[in-house]
Image (cartoon, rainbow, N blue to C red):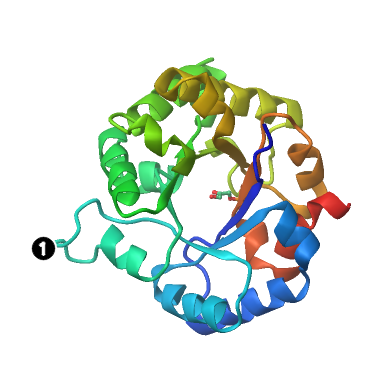
């Protein structure tokens, strides 16, 4: 079964709304139908740039999608500083990152909170990108698979199999994020395959074969093609390299390398 690759740039806390517009314009300048037909391309800017990018995508009919990095699980309420999935849906946001390791480790989000977010995102007809991955210490202790299994299973608890096609899983080993250390293509492939096995446990084998599993962690123009050649890897969640227009465009053109 052919799964459409998903190439997404998670900008994290970078780029004000003006820089964001410039970056998107520069990225699309380097892309054409060959890239849009091949893959789904998504940018995930900070909240403050969502409206500007949505307007740009709409006005110029750009073939890229919009994602958000985070949200609360309630629709509205006294949650100072939070943004709701309902608000994101109004901005034509298609994807919401749930459980990024920085949210887990810096902001203390646990599997239960992440699961509530996943379900809230689906309830608003958006697609969660559920991030999972082990730390360096967990890998050293031989616990990588145990951690990923728990994060997948608990993150997706209570999600109906009918919604399986709207799920994206991102395997992002914490030790590879922002470090320049990439998992070898075969290790990344094995762990993405393991993530898919967990999806099969939750949703059944057929649905698991349709769900896209991304790899994330120091993806660059120089390593993307080899990663994308792996059978179990259906895309990339790109941090640092998505902030450079040339680099992110080159990643989106991986199939032409
Ligand atoms: P880097 O590509 O900077 O390693 O970040 C990966 C990441 O965390 C994407 O969500």
Identify whether 5 is placed above or below 160.
Answer: below
Residue 248 image point, x, y percent: 70, 62
Q: In the current view of this chain or complex, which residue is farthest to the right?
A: 257
User: Dot 1, how many residues are within 10 Å of its Cα: few (below 14), some (14-19), or many (20+)?
Assistant: few
- The residue depicted at 69 percent of the width and 46 percent of the height is 180
Identify whether 198 is placed above or below 176.
Answer: above
Do we see residue 179 in this rendering?
A: no
Residue nearest the viewer, comparing 160 with 25: 160
Residue 188 image point, x, y percent: 67, 30
Query: Quarter-wise, where is residue 142 in the image?
Result: top right
Residue nearest the viewer, comparing 9 with 63: 63
- The residue depicted at 56 percent of the width and 20 percent of the height is 140
Identify whether 82 is placed above or below 110.
Answer: below
Location of the N terminus (image quadrant) = top right
Residue 82 image point, x, y percent: 25, 62
- Marks counted in the figure total 1
Q: In the current view of this chain or complex, which residue is farthest to the left?
A: 78
Residue nearest the viewer, comparing 52 with 164: 164
Look at mark 1 in the image and give the residue it sits on. Answer: 78
Query: Quarter-wise, where is residue 47 in the image?
Result: bottom left
Ligand 1 contact, mark 1 (Cβ < 8 Å): no
Do we see residue 111 in this rendering?
A: yes
Query: What kind of element bears circle 1?
Result: loop
- The residue depicted at 40 percent of the width and 75 percent of the height is 48
Residue 179 image point, x, y percent: 63, 46
- The residue depicted at 68 percent of the width and 28 percent of the height is 189
Q: In the current view of this chain or complex, which residue is farthest to the top?
A: 142
């Amino acid at each position: 079964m052919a799964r459409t690759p998903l190439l997404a740039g998670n900008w994290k806390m970078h780029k004000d709304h003006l820089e964001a517009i410039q970056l998107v314009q520069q990225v699309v300048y380097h892309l054409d139908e060959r890239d849009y037909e091949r893959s789904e391309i998504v940018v995930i800017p900070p909240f403050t740039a969502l409206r500007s990018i949505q307007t740009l995508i709409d006005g110029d009919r750009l073939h890229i999608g919009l994602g958000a990095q985070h949200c609360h699980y309630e629709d509205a309420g006294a949650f100072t500083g939070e943004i709701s999935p309902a608000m994101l849906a109004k901005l034509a946001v298609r994807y919401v990152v749930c459980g990024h390791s920085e949210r887990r480790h810096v902001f203390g989000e646990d599997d239960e909170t992440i699961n509530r977010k996943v379900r809230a995102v689906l309830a608003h007809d958006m697609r969660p990108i559920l991030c999972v991955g082990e730390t360096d210490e967990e890998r050293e202790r031989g616990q990588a698979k145990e951690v990923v299994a728990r994060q997948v299973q608990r993150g997706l608890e209570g999600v109906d199999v009918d919604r399986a096609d709207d799920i994206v899983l991102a395997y992002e080993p914490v030790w590879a994020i922002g470090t320049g250390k990439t998992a070898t293509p075969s290790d990344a492939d094995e762990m993405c395959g393991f993530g898919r096995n967990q999806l099969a446990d939750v949703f059944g084998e057929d649905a698991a074969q349709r769900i896209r599993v991304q790899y994330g962690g120091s993806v660059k123009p120089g390593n993307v093609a080899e990663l994308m050649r792996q059978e179990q890897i259906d895309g990339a969640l790109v941090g640092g390299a998505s902030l450079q227009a040339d680099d992110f465009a080159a990643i989106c053109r991986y199939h032409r390398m």
